[in-house]
Image (cartoon, rainbow, N blue to C red):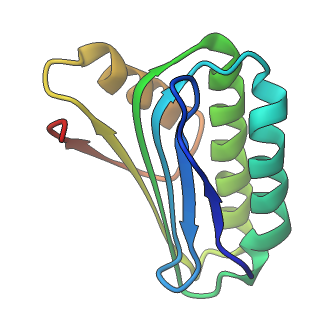
Amino acid sequence: MENIYIEPTSHTPEVYFDMEEHKLHIVGKSYPEDASRFYEPVVAWLEGNISEIKDKFSVEFQFDYFNTSSSKYILRIFLILEDFKKAHPEVALSIIWKYHPNDEEMMESGQEYQQFVTIPFEFVEENKD
C-alpha cells in the first residue's frame, strides 16, 4: 500500500495517508469547483487499500469550511469506514474530528456525521497554527 498525498489549495484540503502509521488526514478548506474530480481518487484509493489495514487505523478530519458537494464525499468516506469496521471489528478504528475554538458549526457538523455511523468520534478543539 502506498502513501497518498494531495497538496492543499485555496479551495481543497490536504489529504495524506501515512502508510507506516495507518493515519489518514484530511485538513483544510473544501469547496472545489468539481468535488467529484477531487474526491473520487481519494475514495477509490481508500476503497482499494483499506482492506490491507490489519491492526489500527486513525482518520483525522479538520475542516475550516466545506460546501455541500464536499459534504457528500465526506459522508461517503464515513460509510466506507463503517463498512470496513463491520467487516473487520478486530481493527482499532478511530475517527478524530478537529475543529477550531468557537467554531460551533463545524463541531456540530461532526456530530451530525457521527449519527450516520456506529464508530465513535473523538472531538478535539484545535487552535489554528
Residue nearest the viewer, comparing 24 with 82? 24
Total numbered badges shown on the rendered structure: 0
Residue nearest the viewer, comparing 57 with 111? 57
Residue 105 image point, x, y percent: 32, 14
Report the side of 121 relative to 5 (left or right). left
Report the side of 129 relative to 83 (left or right). left
Assign the C terminus to one quadrant of the image: top left
Residue sitting at x 63%, y 87%: 54
Residue 122 image point, x, y percent: 31, 50
Is residue 108 placed above or below 40 in the rendered structure?
above
Residue sitting at x 47%, y 81%: 21
Image quarter of residue 79: top right
Report the side of 95 relative to 33 (left or right). left
Residue sitting at x 58%, y 43%: 117
Residue 80 image point, x, y percent: 73, 52
Is residue 129 placed above or below 67 in the rendered structure?
below
Image quarter of residue 86: bottom right
Residue sitting at x 64%, y 12%: 68
Residue 73 image point, x, y percent: 71, 32
Assign the N terminus to one quadrant of the image: bottom right
